[in-house]
Amino acid sequence: MSLDKYWEKRNFQQTPEPRGKPVTTNSAVAKNGLRYFIQRHHARALHYDFRLELGGTLKSWAVPKGPSLDPADKRLAVHVEDHPLAYGSFEGTIPAGQYGAGEVVLWDTGFWIPVGDAEPAYRKGHLKFALQGEKLSGVWALVRMGPARKKKENWLLIKENDEEAKSGKAANITALRPESVLSLVLAQKKHTATATASVAPNKKQGKAIAPQGMRQSLAGIPSTDGAIKKKMPNSMKPQLAALADSAPAGRQWILEIKFDGYRALARKEGNQVRLYSRSGNDWTKKWQVIADALSALGCQQAWLDGEVVAVDAQGNISFQALQSIANDEAQPDAARLAYYVFDILYLNGYDLSAVPQLERKLLLQQLLAGLPGQLVLYSEHLGSDADADAVLQQACAQGLEGIIVKNAEAHYQQSRNRNWLKLKCRSRQEFVIGGYTDPGGSREEFGAILVGVYDADQQLRYAGRVGTGFNRDKLTALKKQFTRIGQTPAPFANPPEGVAAQGVHWVKPVLVVEIEFAEWTATDTLRQASFIALRNDKPARDIVKESALKPKEIPNQEKHMQQDGEQEISVEKRIAGVKLTHPDRPVFADPGLSKLDLAHYYDTVHEWILPHLKKRPLTIVRCPQGNEEKCFFQKHAADSLPKEIRRIEVPEADGAAMYMMASDLASLVALVQIGALELHTWGSHQRALMKPDRLIFDLDPAPGLPWPRTVEAAQLMRGMLQEVGLQSFVKTTGGKGLHVVAPITPGYEWDEVKAFARAIAEHMAQTLPDRFTANMRKSSRAGKIFIDYLRNAQGATAVAAYSPRVHENAPVSTPLSWDELGADVHSDTFTVKNLPRRLQQLRQDPWKDYFTLKQKITGGMIKLFKRTGAT
């Protein structure tokens, strides 16, 4: 499984070839079918690279003349170094000066099924197998000429004499089928078998080759690196793309068509298939014909991601036809549904979210390869060498909506993020209807709709009028809905006034429409806007202004620059528009995490951590040279800090001071840039800094105390709080203990809340003196849990939920549900590396009620503990 020779020969800063790594392949899978790839390689001499997946890598042979279908043509095959599995889908140009310089084209791909036990046969030098591919099929053999050697070995590639064998010109398959099999089929929109079939047809049978070996392999353990054994979730959210104004630079991006349809996630368990809209609505009945087609997939369990479209009589994708079908309206003549699938998230007991994007696509292509009919189709892609601008122009010329650009190395994330980017042919997005005007002239029903988008404070902002694009049916249908949802006050925070408000009728902001327009004006209103369609697959509250990312805001954008007074070239990267210098510098030495890794962590989890940080004074632990070097606490915001780190004025004994805050992803990345490895917050919000909004108890076990004692302590503390009428939440500290946290409505001053917390801690210590202590002296803590109530004082902080800690393996303070708390989950179980996977797998936020729970400390609670003497 070693790739040392492969790595030694290549400079991955110069070549677009993937570095890759070995993976573990299940032996049972190897008997049933693994992947193979053949690449046409124009290096110093033209040859074909024949690659078989085996033992976690691609065993590789250079075949100078390429394969022949004639059994009499025994083709020389020179055994070369193993390649990573990620190399299989590589297409591109290896630059001059690099090993193997020249053009590489993926000529064929499919599955191979060994005859007998593959690995012993390979070692003996006589490997016999069946191919099920795009261009090659039937039985073949690779035979070593002479004994095994460490240096290059000469083998022969031989076609067996079976029904797939040919002679004469018909055997020259490389001349007959020179095309790449990794081309983006822009003609997918034509919805014909020739344009959309993922597998080349078997001309004898008139249908796609049945990938029986593949289906058997998928029934076992996927050999793809990153697959994690896990119970299939009942629900999942789709990954969403960020709008960009140009394609990113770099070699790690692939291109796909942006379809004009409804996003759909498909869940298959046994023969039952459910289809869900982007917002999680069950639309199986609307798309029953697709669900029925998916039931024939050769797997027991799966989650798929794709787009449902409608194809009209001319072969064009029609969103209007799709709406008619979805709304149970009369179906247009000859319009039919299709489901273009572009991702796979789960398969046969394995979560594939952490599998790299390109690997997921290869697995998906295998799964869909033998599915009959034209209802479920694989969404093709172009590799990293494609000219994105040219592809976008071609897509626009064919009337498509645009293209999607995806990071080939990224994991699947159930959120909007910058690893998927959308480039549109025209400005187009969703808006919320807030009103309409009276009709004028010959127009009936209404004149125009008034639309808006929600801002960061969840206020609906007026964005202009839309008066074109409606036909008679849409005018009538919309007016009926307006009549039912009318209201008196304007729903906009900034409604039009004066003449612009005359003849306007307001409606509840619940209807979402898709609008095409020329541009946003300087006053944030639309110019030349036209109605496209009513959208019932997206909640109104999710509709915000889409701002295109600039190249500098897209992650992994490389910028080489000369260092002052130095000869070395370093690399800068930008995430959320923030520059990371020395992104490869280690910040956590033990798990091998760099600044860039930590920034990517925050990019993944920012929607989870920011609610715990926003508008709260922040204290950080800075480790400029990494966690193994000198670290220090910092709470004041120095003038030299990046501007992305927000400031907040905080009263102190000798006057006001400026503290730090983190309110968005850019703030988090800027904190990474300055070496902040831990984030600690006050227990109060900017709106009432002198009145805490939480009670927090830090349960700190004595050294050597068994973990179940800490778990028991948290449960006892929860019970104590419940007795007085306070609900609480639990999280790991990322260190040794647990935090029990009770959110409260601000009402009491810091000293009063601290005294109340102390009373509870001392009551626990008095009631169970063999288990607890509220005394911080080490001499009193032996064999006990120290209940640290001091974090409830003014200026005191506690580590924020989802913040890393400066400890071995980069553990993270992680919110848990009370049901999760037990012997299997320790304080340092979740880390920067594995927490994103946990969040992807959660059915719901374990602290989902934390920010909405309304409870307060009452005078009766305070008196209760005074009566017990715990004051």
Image: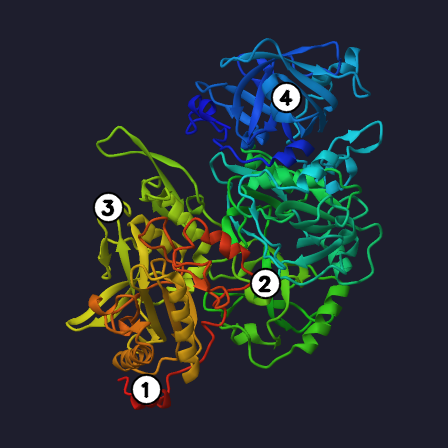
Is there CB contact under 8 Å for labels 3 and 4? no
Q: Is residue 831 placed above or below 182 in the rendered structure?
A: below
Residue identified by numbered label 3: 629
Amino acid carrying label 3: it is Glu
Read off the residue under disc 2.
431
Q: Percent from the top left, x then y, of residue 162?
A: 80, 19
Marks 2 and 4, the one that precedes in the sequence: 4
N-terminal of the pair, mark 4 or mark 1, is 4
Q: In front of the other: label 3 or label 4?
A: 4
Q: Nearer the viewer, mark 2 or mark 3?
A: 3
Which mark, residue 121? Answer: 4
Residue flagged by tag 1: what amino acid is it? Answer: Phe
> Relative to the observer, which residue lies in front, 371 or 780?
780
Disc 2, disc 3: CB below 8 Å? Answer: no
Which dot, 3 or 1, sits closer to the camera?
Answer: 1
Viewer-proximal residue, 113 or 765?
765
The residue under label 2 is which amino acid type?
A: Phe
Q: Which residue is mark 1?
A: 865
Q: Rate crowding at label 4 as few (under 14), some (14 to 19) or many (20 or more) other CA atoms within 10 Å.
A: some
How much space separates mark 3 and mark 1, taking CA atoms? 45 Å
Mark 3 secondary-structure assignment: loop
In whole angstroms, how far apart are the C-alphas of marks 4 and 1? 77 Å
The one nearer the camera, 806 or 247, is: 806
Q: Residue at x 47, y 37 (%)?
A: 249
